[in-house]
Amino acid sequence: MPQPKYRKIAVLGYRSVGKSSLTIQFVEGQFVDSYDPTIENTFNKMVSVNGQDFNLQLVDTAGQDEYSIFPQSHSMDIHGYVLVYSVTSMKSFEVVQVLHDKLLDMVGKIQVPTVLVGNKKDLHMERVIKPEEGKKLADSWGAAFMESSAKENQLFTKHVIYLSVFKRIILEMEKVDGNAPSEEKKCAVM
């Protein structure tokens, strides 16, 4: 039996985009409707991906804005990033782009395992960012992209959406480590 791999994941984004809802839904399987701005929380969860156990430490960060100083703690010992915006907020979409730039400056790498998540996809009437816009941004970063809804997850089988967000970041981290079978080969011409 292989030893569980320890992975630390930071969940970043503008305030009120659903970072805590995503994280708590994944860890505890429940949707938290009440909203207290998060200072910073850390959650732990064991998860198995492709027969390998992962001991995940999820850092649910305080909401950031474009003027926030990128905390050094968000780049130390972090293996992967989940960047979250709300599909109902253009501001959150702009902020997530600034956060990604600051992240790259801080870690000093071109390629950092990242999943871009457009959250609150259940709010159809309030949507201002199309899925294609999120996908285009993620592609420009070389990141994975998905949309989710912390709320709708309750209606589906437990952990389906969330496992995929956090499972996806694990696959991205493994790919960078050279361990994961990549679904498609990416080729870049400079």
Image (cartoon, rainbow, N blue to C red):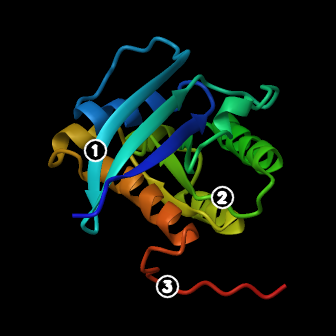
To which quarter of the image does residue 106 belong? top right
60 is higher (above) or lower (below) than 178: above
Residue closer to the observer: 160 or 42:
42
Q: CA distance from mark 3 to mark 2?
A: 18 Å
Find numbered disc 2 in the image and state the secondary structure of the residue it sits on. Answer: loop
Q: Percent from the top left, x then y, of residue 185? A: 55, 87
Residue closer to the observer: 17 or 56:
56
6 is higher (above) or lower (below) than 132: above
**Quadrant location of the C terminus?**
bottom right
Residue denoted by label 2: 112
Q: Percent from the top left, x then y, of residue 52? A: 29, 63
Q: Find the residue positioned furthest to the top.
A: 36
Find numbered disc 1 in the image and state the secondary structure of the residue it sits on. Answer: strand
Q: CA distance from mark 2 to mark 1?
A: 22 Å
At label 2, the amino acid type is Val
Q: Percent from the top left, x then y, of residue 96? A: 68, 42
Task: Please tell me which of labels 2 and 1 falls first in the chain.
Answer: 1
Q: Foreground mark, 1 or 3?
A: 1
141 is higher (above) or lower (below) than 126: below
Task: Please tell me which of labels 1 and 3 falls first in the chain.
Answer: 1
At label 3, the amino acid type is Glu
